[in-house]
Image (tube, rainbow, N blue to C red):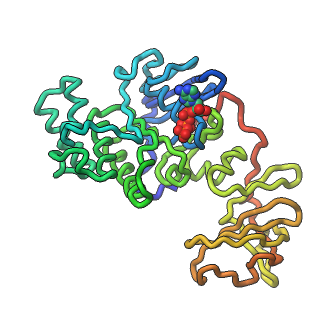
Amino acid sequence: MRMMVPTPAPGGAADEPPAVRVTGLHKRYADVTALAATDLTVRPGEFFTLLGPSGSGKTTLLRLIAGFERPDGGAIELAGRDVTGVPPFARDVNTVFQDYALFPHMTIAENIEYGLKVRHVGKQARRDRVARALDMVQLGGLGGRKPAQLSGGQRQRVALARAIVNEPQVLLLDEPLGALDLKLRQHMQRELLRIQREVGITFIYVTHDQEEALTMSDRIAVLNLGKIEQVGAPAEVYEHPKTAFVADFIGVSNLIQRDGRQLTVRPEKITILADGDAEPAGAHVEPGTIRDVIYAGVLTRYVVELDAGGELTVSRLNTDSSPGDTSGGRSGGARVRVAWQDRQAVTISEQAPGAVVAGAGEG
Ligand SMILES: Nc1ncnc2c1ncn2[C@@H]1O[C@H](COP(=O)(O)OP(=O)(O)OP(=O)(O)O)[C@@H](O)[C@H]1O
């Protein structure tokens, strides 16, 4: 699923401790369980994403790792060192927020240099590192400008440079592209990946955008109601969702009950057979009625109500059809058969896993 940069997924040397390990970490606010007891391991150099809807606990987990929040229990290790009681400034992590506050009266270079000054890095070393950081985010010529003289995307890159210049072991990013429009966001996604690969820093990235998570991450943790429901590579969580929530949140909800099991089949794995179409060998075939046809540019979605109960969305690429093509009897109200190979149907559990969940010590 990683499509932007063809580098192998990092893992760190076998004897290298995880970049981040949290065990039994939990946090409540009054009667809200913001984070249920959670185990999670992030590998050195990994681009690791926390994905979930609003209120699922992503920011809480990130702020606990940064040290901005105190856990009610559990432990946090960075590179093998227990930092649970260590204040934020003494942890080797930096955070980039969505509302990246740059100092308006300082130049871009001064903004980036600030953290190094605070840590008493020598003048020449500061200059070199700021110049390198500016080059890395492709703002080489703009160090003398003030933040107000930059675009939103440029300011976001300054915020990134300001964090990277400190060379933290782990960079925490809380929806850093949330304020940008779609085009710029997609451009910055590629930039972020390039920079992450170049500097080799472990990234923990918070987003509620499933497509962003799928395209950028080495691995994704899917959160729901303060619990991690699944941890895995993008293709793993997409192709083999473990829970109904994951199946629904990543991609289109395609859940049906058959023979006492709950199944999900991804829309692009299903074929619609019109009258006279032969059934593919070995396929599971069910009759139904098309209830909706939704043209979406690159593809068209067909919502099919199945005679045996339930509804499936089927997607078909518009490779050689005219817009809104409903040829072959694939229009609203049409009687059709849908077909998929058995191996494409994933059985999922009814319940989310227990409070202490996946991720710890995974391969
Ligand atoms: N300081 C706080 N005081 C009280 N409740 C809080 C506080 N911070 C978070 N919560 C609650 O904890 C839960 C998890 O919040 P959190 O911010 O971690 O979610 P999130 O997944 O990051 O959401 P979003 O995508 O909207 O930022 C929510 O129900 C939220 O209302």
Of residue 362 and residue 177, the one placed in the foreground of this image is 177
Residue plotted at (24% across, 39% down): 104
Q: How many marks?
A: 0
Q: Position of residue 27 (x, y in %)?
A: 58, 23
Q: Would residue 61 be visible to someone looking at this image?
A: yes
Q: Residue furthest left?
A: 124
Q: Does residue 78 lie above or below 276 as drawn?
A: above
Q: Quadrant of the C terminus?
A: top right
Q: Is residue 88 left or right of residue 64?
A: left
Question: Residue 317: image x %, image y %?
Answer: 60, 73
Q: Quadrant of ligand 1?
A: top right
Q: Residue at x 76, y 82 (%)?
A: 329
Q: Position of residue 219 (x, y in %)?
A: 52, 44
| Residue lying at the far top of the rendered structure | 85
Q: Is residue 15 left or right of residue 322?
A: left
Q: Quadrant of residue 102?
A: top left
- Asked if residue 363 can be seen in this view, the reply is no
Point 25% across, 45% down: residue? 147
What residue sits 46% from the left and 43% below the top?
175
